[in-house]
Image (cartoon, grey):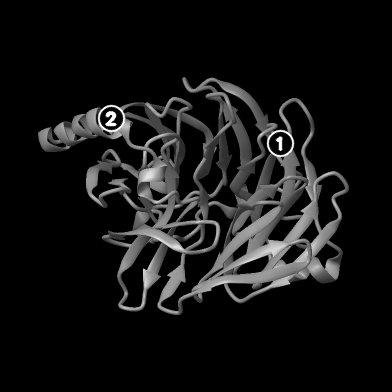
Amino acid sequence: MATRRGFLQSLLAASVLPSLTWADAGNPSYLSAAKLADDSYVLFGLDTTGQTRFSIPLPTRGHAAAAHPTQPIAVAFARRPGTYAIVLDCVSGAEIARMHAPDGHHFYGHGAFSMDGNTLFTTENHIETGEGVIGVWQNYQRIGAFPSNGIGPHEILRMPMTDTLIVANGGIHTHPDTGRAKLNIDSMQPNLSYLSSRGEVLETVTLAQPKNSIRHIAVRPDGLVGMAMQWQGGVANVPPLLALHRMGDPAQEIAAAPAQHRWLKGYAGSIAFAQTSVGITSPRGGVAQIFNVDTAVLEAQIKRPDICGLAPYDAGFIATDGLGHVVQITDTTETELSRDTTISWDNHLVSIS
C-alpha cells in the first residue's frame, strides 16, 4: 500500500524535476546495474566512452532499469522475483519513491514509460495463477493493471513515437516458493504481444518452437522488433535464438551456421539494433553475434567471457561483461573502452533516449 510519505515524495519529484534534464546528470547514454567487489550493488550511468557519469547504491541485486524519456529519473528493478523498484533522481542520487508489487505479485525486472513519461508500465507475475500482468503506475503509485496476454512477461518496451507496448511473454511459470525453478516446460507457450496502453491486444506472435522462451526484445526506430530467446529443450538441435518481426508480417528466425550457433549454448541474454545490424549476446557462451538485418548473414562474432549487456553505439554496439569491461563493437573490430575489475556488470545496458 502506498504511504503518505511516498505519495508526497512523488508529488515533490513531479513538481521539481521537470526543469532538469539528463544533461544535469552528466549526459549519460546508458544505465546498467552492477555488483561491486565488496558485494554491494549499484546503478551506474555510463557515457559512450564507457566512463561512469553517476553511481547510486541499490539495496540488492538489480536487473534492468527504465529511463524517463525527458527527466533524469531512473526506475531500478530488482532481479526477479523481486517485489520492489526504486525511483532514483540521477542528479542528486536521492531515492524519490519505492514501488512495491501488490500482494501476490512480483516484478520481472523490466518496465517502460509512456511517451509523455507520465505513466510507467511494469511486467509482473500473479503468483498463484502464473498469469502475466502489466502494472500501470502514475506518480509511481499503482493505478491499475491488465493482462500481459501470456505467462512470464519479461521485457517490455514502447513502440517508438507511440504508446503501443511490446511485451516478451517468456511462457515460463515460476513461483517464489520454488525460487527460479521452471514449472511448466512441457506446456509453455511464449509469445510476443503488442498491446495498447489500455491493455487491448493488437497482435500476437508465436514462434515454431514452444520451448524457445522469448525473453528480451529490442525495437528499431522504424518499428522493427528483435527477439532474443532462451531454449528450454535439450542441448542438441537448438533452434534459432534470434527473430525479427514487424507488425502485420510473419516473424523471421535467424541463426548462424551450426558451428557458430553452438557458441550461444542455447541462451541469448541481451539484444540490440544498430542501424542495419542486430546483435545478441550469450554470457553462457561468452560470445556476441552480429547479423545483417537485411540479409540475415552473420557479420561478426566476438568472444568475450560473460558478455551480456548490449546497446547501440554510433554505427556499432557497446557491450559490458561480468569482469568489468566496457567494449565497442564495430564491424569485426572490438575496442576496449574501459575496464574496472571491481565492477561486475549485470545483464543489461539500457539506452537513454
Q: Which residue is mark 1?
A: 224
The one nearer the camera, 129 or 126, is: 126
Q: Residue at x 54, y 51 (%)?
A: 184
Label 2 environment density (alpha carbons within 10 Å; few <14, some 14–19, many ≥20): many
Q: Quadrant of residue 75?
A: top left
Looking at this rendering, what residue extends furthest in the left direction? 4
What label does residue 114 carry, if any? Answer: none
Residue 239 visible, this orientation: no
In percent of width and height, residue 281 lies at 65, 62
What label does residue 139 carry, if any? Answer: 2
**In the displayed structure image, the side of residue 246 where residue 298 appears, left or right:** right
In percent of width and height, residue 22 lies at 40, 43
**In the displayed structure image, the side of residue 166 where residue 119 appears, left or right:** left
**In the displayed structure image, the side of residue 212 where residue 31 appears, left or right:** left
Q: Residue at x 79, y 55 (%)?
A: 291
In percent of width and height, residue 104 lies at 30, 41
Q: Amino acid at mark 1?
A: Leu
Q: Distance from label 2 to label 1 (Cα)?
A: 30 Å
Q: Relative to 147, say whether 66 is above or below.
A: below
**In the displayed structure image, the side of residue 223 where residue 83 appears, left or right:** left
Q: Relative to 293, say whether 42 is above or below.
A: below
In percent of width and height, residue 110 lies at 45, 46
The one nearer the camera, 156 or 152, is: 156
Q: Relative to 348, say whether 273 is above or below.
A: above
Q: Which quadrant does the N terminus fall into?
A: top left
Q: Amino acid at mark 2?
A: Asn
